Image (cartoon, rainbow, N blue to C red):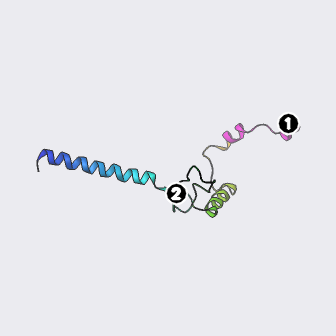
């Protein structure tokens, strides 16, 4: 195989790889069930995006409310970032 042909085949392979990556990047999936999700159009009313359905949106919300999901950080950091409550002030 000539060097030009090798270079051309490498370029084509790179372009195909980029196309596959672009396609994956554009394919949105529901965070709860991983089903494909269409992005909302600007003129459409609010939907349950990025979830595929209201059910998946509520399942995710339930996970946050049950504290199965958390934002990373220590409990000390969380306690320091909270404002002092009036109840704590009265105890002193």
Residue 70: x and y, percent? Answer: 63, 50
- Range shown magenta: 76-92
Residue 16: x and y, percent? Answer: 30, 52
Residue lying furthest left = 2
- The residue singled out by tag 1 in the image is 89
* The one of 4 and 40 positioned closer to us in this rendering: 40
The residue located at (32%, 51%) in the rendering is: 17
Residue 4: x and y, percent? Answer: 14, 45
Q: Marks 2 and 1: in contact by CB < 8 Å?
A: no
Q: Is residue 40 left or right of residue 76?
A: left
Question: At numbered mark 2, what does the secondary structure look like: helix, strand or loop?
Answer: loop
* The one of 38 and 34 positioned closer to us in this rendering: 38
The residue located at (57%, 49%) in the rendering is: 42
Q: Quadrant of residue 66?
A: bottom right
Q: How many marks?
A: 2
Q: Quadrant of residue 45?
A: bottom right
Q: Quadrant of residue 81?
A: top right
Magenta stretch: helix, strand or loop mostly: helix
Asked if residue 15 is among those painted magenta in the image, a careful observer would answer no
Establish if 70 lies above or below 62: above
Q: Is residue 27 left or right of residue 84?
A: left
* The one of 91 and 35 positioned closer to us in this rendering: 35
- The residue singled out by tag 2 in the image is 38
Give the Cα distance between marks 1 and 2.
Answer: 50 Å
Question: At numbered mark 1, what does the secondary structure look like: helix, strand or loop?
Answer: helix
The residue located at (44%, 51%) in the rendering is: 25
């Amino acid at each position: 195989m000539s060097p030009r042909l090798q270079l051309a085949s490498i370029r084509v392979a790179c372009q195909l790889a980029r196309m596959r990556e672009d396609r994956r990047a554009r394919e949105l999936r529901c965070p709860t069930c991983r089903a494909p999700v269409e992005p909302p159009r600007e003129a459409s009313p609010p939907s349950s995006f990025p979830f595929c359905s209201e059910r998946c949106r509520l399942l995710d919300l339930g996970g946050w409310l049950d504290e199965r999901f958390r934002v990373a950080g220590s409990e000390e950091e969380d306690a320091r970032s909270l404002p002092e409550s009036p109840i704590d002030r009265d105890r002193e």
